[in-house]
Image (cartoon, grey):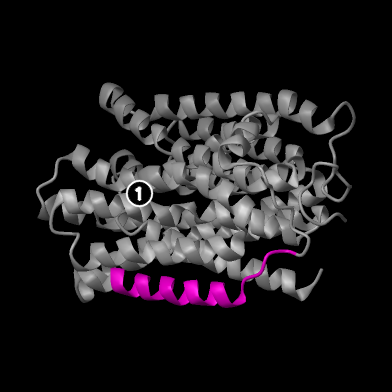
Amino acid sequence: MSGRAWLMLALATVGFAVNFWAWALLSPLGPRFKDGLDLSSFEQSLLVAVPVVVGSLGRIPVGALTDRFGGRVMFPIVSAATVVPVLYLGLAGHSSLGALLIGGFFLGIGGTAFAVGVPLVNAWFPPQRRGLAIGVFGAGMGGTAISALTTVKLVDAYSMSTAFLITAAVLAVYAVAAATLLRDAPGRTVPTEPLARRLAATTKLPITWQASALYAVAFGGYVAFSVYLPTYLKTGYGLTQADAANRMAGFVLLAVAMRPMGGWLSDRLGPVRVLAGSLAVVVAGAVVQSFTPALAPVGTLAFLAMAAALGAGSGATFTLVSLRTPAEQVGSVTGVVGAAGGLGGFLPPLVMGSLYGAYGTYAAGLVLLAIVAAAALAFTLTGVRASAEGGGREPRAGRRHRTSAGTAA
């Protein structure tokens, strides 16, 4: 594998992390804005939700545009465009709910970086290395952890503007570096059809809907826990806010670390097998946790197992995308699948909160998670496996595929 491909992977991963860092700036400050601006719980939730929803849905057109213009063009554009709302929020846009919602809407641009990086990385690597490469790129989702760990501390130590100004400076530096150093893979397939027609064609590919369903469970589960776990631990186990936040950080870091591992295992075992194993672990972990066992050690082990499984499953899903999608449609499919994953994280916290309010326990919510994961497991072992095998054995990542994107092995 050429050193240049690994350099492009490193640049894309850094860009993904930096943009996700910016994308997640408002979430850690939600409680502060709630108190300072006297927001209702719904208004606080709306404030946090707007950039995530815009970033998730925005991946669909941005992915299609990346197919057409390439990551070399789109990464600097997305990064530079994200600088504007970050500066606005830091300097003037944090004094009212309306200003925060406007800034948060455009902050969603940062969340679209995922749909730029996957087709860029995919085209640089042959099929037998794509799982690991895209998994490494996917670890850039740890940018949200950077925001969670630094934003409030910077605001407390300095001022509200500080965290935003630092993030804007890092984004600007990256935009310049990407414009200077980033390159698309030689021989990249460039579609010629109009955007609307390409998006319509994407909806006709079975992999688009298969991967969307699986990613909504795998990555959506990761998003849901990363948002709701502190509340769950504080309410269900009586932990302090700081202790709950630290445990959530451990959950996030393990999931992030396991995403490349999921891709690596998919290169060797096939993504369907890795997805099936991951979903089975989620089912088992959710069932165990539905009994609200003692946090040490059973509850902790259940959550860590689910974190590892959700991270590995997310990596395996995009290995499947990279192997089953035509080269000129990887960005478009990535956009739709990425949107499904981002949006998949919003329903579970709402359901968990509603069920706890109704029954005074989280057991029903965790049983529901187990049922959803079991349904995804059954779908993986039937429809997804049948589609991947094409009538024979599951294709391994190291074999040639007529539909594989980028460089053939």
Image: 127 above or below 159: above
Q: Position of residue 340 (x, y in %)?
A: 51, 37
* Residue at 9% in and 48% down: 38
Viewer-proximal residue among 146 and 303:
146
Image: 347 above or below 266: above
Q: Can the viewer see residue 306 in this picture?
A: yes
Identify the secondary structure beneath mark 1.
Answer: helix
Write down the residue under mark 1: 51
- Mark 1 packing: few (<14 Cα in 10 Å), some, or many (20+)? many
* Residue span colored magenta: 164-185
Q: Is residue 166 magenta?
A: yes
Q: Quadrant of the N terminus?
A: bottom right
Q: Position of residue 157 (x, y in %)?
A: 22, 75
Q: Position of residue 109 (x, y in %)?
A: 41, 54
> In the shown orientation, is residue 159 left or right of residue 213?
left
* Residue at 61% in and 28% down: 376
> In the shown orientation, is residue 227 left or right of residue 76?
left
Q: Can the viewer see residue 255 in this picture?
A: no
Amino acid type indicated by mark 1:
Pro
Q: Quadrant of the C terminus?
A: bottom right
Q: Is residue 107 magenta?
A: no
Image: 26 above or below 167: above
